[in-house]
Amino acid sequence: MGALAMTGAAAAVIFPVVKALDPSLPEYAAYTGPHWRLAAGHVASRIFLISDAVQLGCIIITGLTLGVIALTADAWAKPIVTALRIISLLAAISILAYSFAFLGPRMNLNLANYWDAAKTGDNEAALVYQQAFDKDHPTASRVMVGSFLCALLLTTSGAFAASGASNLNTLTRTSTKRTLEEPSLSKGKQLK
């Protein structure tokens, strides 16, 4: 959740700030379009790459730990919560798989082609690739929001399961009283 939130926040800050700076990039001197998009895009693309790596690592760790938890009998003491956690994880995996297999490669290819065309001064081609990238941007935003919601649901249901399990254990410990043998001194017997 943190990686997704910070990635979105970083993009929301980088693009307006770089636009206001109105940079001119010598490497893209032949490009007549706005250079701020190029500069901000180079920075943001690295942040998105880091975010993707963090998401992949987190989903692997979450999948492994939830898999181990789901194999225990305690996890199924609250079957609705456990099922919700598994469904949330599967939804997160599906969203990430779509992003990694289809959306991300297409957007990265359009972005790389945009940068290459801009570098060579092919303004028309650069515009075509930029528009293709921009067309996928709303979908990418929805994917980020969906991933965030899955992570939030996983975290919330995990916290609920953990707190519920500890309360259940406390309740079980306090309600189960051991019957101890009455001490022999209290029965009036004396030690010899």
Image: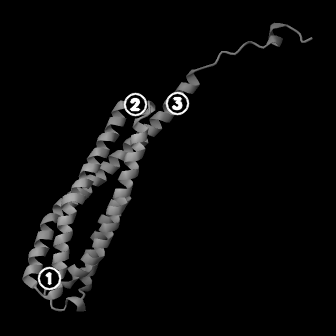
Residue topped by disc 1: 117
Decide which of 22, 84 is in the foreground and name it: 84
The numbered mark at residue 169 is: 3
Say which amino acid is labelled 3.
Asn
Identified at 14% across, 69% down, the residue is 134
Q: Amino acid type of disc 2?
A: Trp
Where in the figure is residue 58, as x and y percent of width and height? 38, 54
Q: Residue at x 27, y 77 (%)?
A: 42
Return the disc, 2 or 3, that comes first in the chain's sequence: 2
Marks 2 and 1: CB-CB under 8 Å? no
Residue 10 falls left or right of residue 26: right
Q: Please rate how many residues cluster around mark 1, counting C-alpha atoms within 10 Å: few if below 14, some from 14 to 19, many from 20.
A: many
Q: Is 107 on the left-hand or right-hand side of 71? A: left
How far from the left and from the top, in percent, is residue 73? 44, 30
| Circle 2 Cα neighbour tier, 10 Å, few/some/many (<14 / 14–19 / ≥20) | some
Q: Which residue is mark 2?
A: 76
In this view of the protein, can residue 14 be seen by the observer?
Answer: yes
**Quick one: which residue is furthest to the right in this view?**
192
Quadrant containing the N terminus in the rendered view: bottom left
Number of marks in the image? 3
Q: Quadrant of the C terminus?
A: top right
Mark 2 or mark 1, which has the lower sequence index? Answer: 2
Image height check: is 111 above or below 79? below
